[in-house]
């Protein structure tokens, strides 16, 4: 692991039991969840939903920074609808993602520039780059 110049935050999560009936709780107890299989009637969430939520929130933050660099205002009703697919090829699992970016009121070329710049800045985008198929759609 390379040494970061400055650690801004460390998330600490304790997970037991996995995606089928497991639980996970943060050290500050602000996130305390149960897991269930995707598509099941179970009461919990699943890792794909958590990835989609975290990536969406982080991506909006990256778009705010990107808009600032591009000297445009990020619309108040900016949104990202993220879809994470859990896939199976043979006996191997994989993920793929689509981030559907909504920047109402921005010209299409400006919205595309904001989304593309954010995709280069967002830590989730960086973490997945080259590892999974990702589409950034401006809708």
Image (cartoon, grey):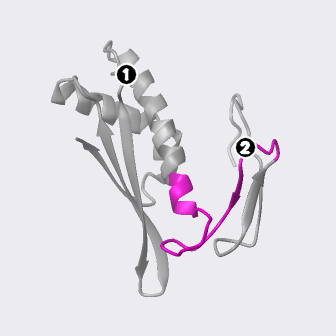
Q: Locate residue 105, reporting x and y percent.
A: 22, 23
Identify residue for label 2: 11
Work out how far the residue at label 1 is from the one at label 2, CA to CA, in angstroms.
28 Å
Single out the residue that lies furthest toward the right.
27
Q: What stretch is highlighted in magenta?
A: 27-51
Identify residue for label 1: 76
Image height check: is 133 above or below 65?
below
Q: Which mark is residue 42?
A: none
> Split into 4 quadrants, where in the image is the C terminus?
top left
Single out the residue that lies furthest toward the left.
108
**Left or right of 65, for residue 46:** right
Single out the residue that lies furthest toward the bottom.
90
**Left or right of 107, for residue 95:** right
Image height check: is 82 above or below 105?
below
Judged from the image, the secondary structure of the residue bearing numbered disc 2 is loop
Q: Locate residue 108, reporting x and y percent.
A: 17, 30
Q: Residue at x 54, y 45 (%)?
A: 54
Is the residue marked by circle 1 packed among few (<14), some (14-19), or many (20+) residues within 10 Å? few
Image height check: is 73 above or below 104?
above
């Amino acid at each position: 692991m390379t040494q970061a110049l400055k650690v801004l935050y460390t998330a600490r999560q304790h997970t037991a039991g996995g995606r089928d009936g497991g639980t996970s709780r943060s050290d500050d107890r602000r996130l305390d969840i149960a897991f269930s299989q995707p598509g099941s009637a179970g009461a919990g969430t699943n890792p794909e939903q958590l990835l989609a939520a975290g990536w969406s929130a982080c991506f909006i933050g990256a778009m705010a920074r990107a808009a600032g660099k591009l000297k445009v205002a990020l619309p108040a009703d900016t949104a990202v609808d993220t879809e994470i697919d859990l896939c199976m090829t043979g006996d191997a699992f994989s993920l793929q993602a689509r981030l559907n970016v909504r920047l109402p009121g921005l010209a299409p070329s400006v919205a595309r520039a904001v989304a593309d710049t954010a995709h280069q800045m967002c830590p989730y985008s960086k973490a997945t780059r080259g590892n999974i198929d990702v589409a950034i759609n401006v809708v």
